[in-house]
Amino acid sequence: MADHAPAAPADHSAFNGFAFTPENKAKADWHIAKYPAGRQQSAVMPLLDLAQRQVGAQTNTQGWLPVPVIEYVADYLGMPYIRTYEVASFYTMYNLAPVGRFHVQLCGTTPCWIKGSDEVLRACKDLGLAKGATTADGLFTLTEVECLGACVNAPMVQINDDFYEDLTYESTRAILEDLQAGRTPKVGPQVDRQFSAPLGGPTTLKGAA
Ligand code: FES
């Protein structure tokens, strides 16, 4: 669960009567059909993700999981609400409070920290972002998260569904400023490397044997 201020009761009740759109209902049923009869609860994670994305589409944000939405998913799968909530509250990919248009998840775990995540955080702060909060314009929410599995390209952030890697103060700032201005920044490594290959290109197996 992201470390944000709790949502207000009215934020939750605004989603009373939530139901999947026909398109998302078809996707939900597709996920459920992957599991044997009676094991539909195994689809809880993709269904919570679908629900969060639907809330995001309705609010022009990255979405979150208000109580009526979690209850809807629980009912859809025939599982107790508390067990559904346990899943939603365990993983940082689910938001239990509203987030902005761009959800900046900053990795602060050891490899990223050693490689300069403090500088990434400083760039975020200099543009008005604060941990656990959404900017007044509703554009950015900043959350510090644990390792996102891209340590070889540390330090990095995830923004919405994309990773931005090999960051510095300057490149972080440039990415956020691009998003602010409606531009699309380059995803992945922000230095001269392909995925997690060596800087500057391959160093071995460069020619035919
Ligand atoms: S420590 Fe940051 S991605 Fe693993």
Image (spheres, rainbow, N blue to C red):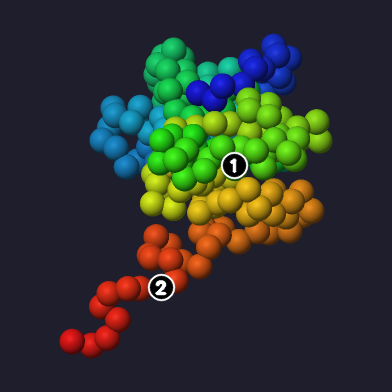
**Label annotation for residue 119:** 1
Figure quadrant of residue 104: top right
In percent of the image, x 63 and y 28: which residue is there? 131
In percent of the image, x 60 and y 61: which residue is there? 186
Coordinates of residue 152 in the picture (x, y in percent): 38, 51
Q: Residues within 10 Å of mark 2 (few under 14, many from 20)?
A: few
In percent of the image, x 52 and y 43: which residue is there? 116
Q: Residue furthest bottom?
A: 208
Q: How far apart are the two marked residues, 1 and 2, measured between alpha carbons?
A: 26 Å
Is residue 127 left or right of 197 when viewed as pictured? right
Which of the pair 159/38 is nearer the observer? 159
State which tag comes first along the sequence, 1 or 2: 1
Ligand 1 quadrant assignment: top left
Q: Is residue 17 visible?
A: no
Coordinates of residue 101 in the picture (x, y in percent): 70, 40
Marks 1,2: beta carbons within 8 A: no
* Residue under pointer 2: 201
Figure quadrant of residue 96: top right
Which of the pair 118/179 is nearer the observer? 118
Element assignment for label 1:
helix
Element assignment for label 2:
loop
In percent of the image, x 53 and y 40: which residue is there? 117
Coordinates of residue 56 in the picture (x, y in percent): 65, 37
Q: Is mark 1 within 8 Å of ligand 1?
A: no
Please determine whether, in this image, residue 42 is positioned above or below residue 184.
Answer: above
Q: Quadrant of the C terminus?
A: bottom left
Q: Residues within 10 Å of mark 1 (few under 14, many from 20)?
A: some
The type of residue carrying mark 1 is Glu
The type of residue carrying mark 2 is Gly
Q: Which tag is nearer the camera, tag 1 or tag 2?
A: 1
Please determine whether, in this image, residue 196 is positioned above or below residue 40.
Answer: below
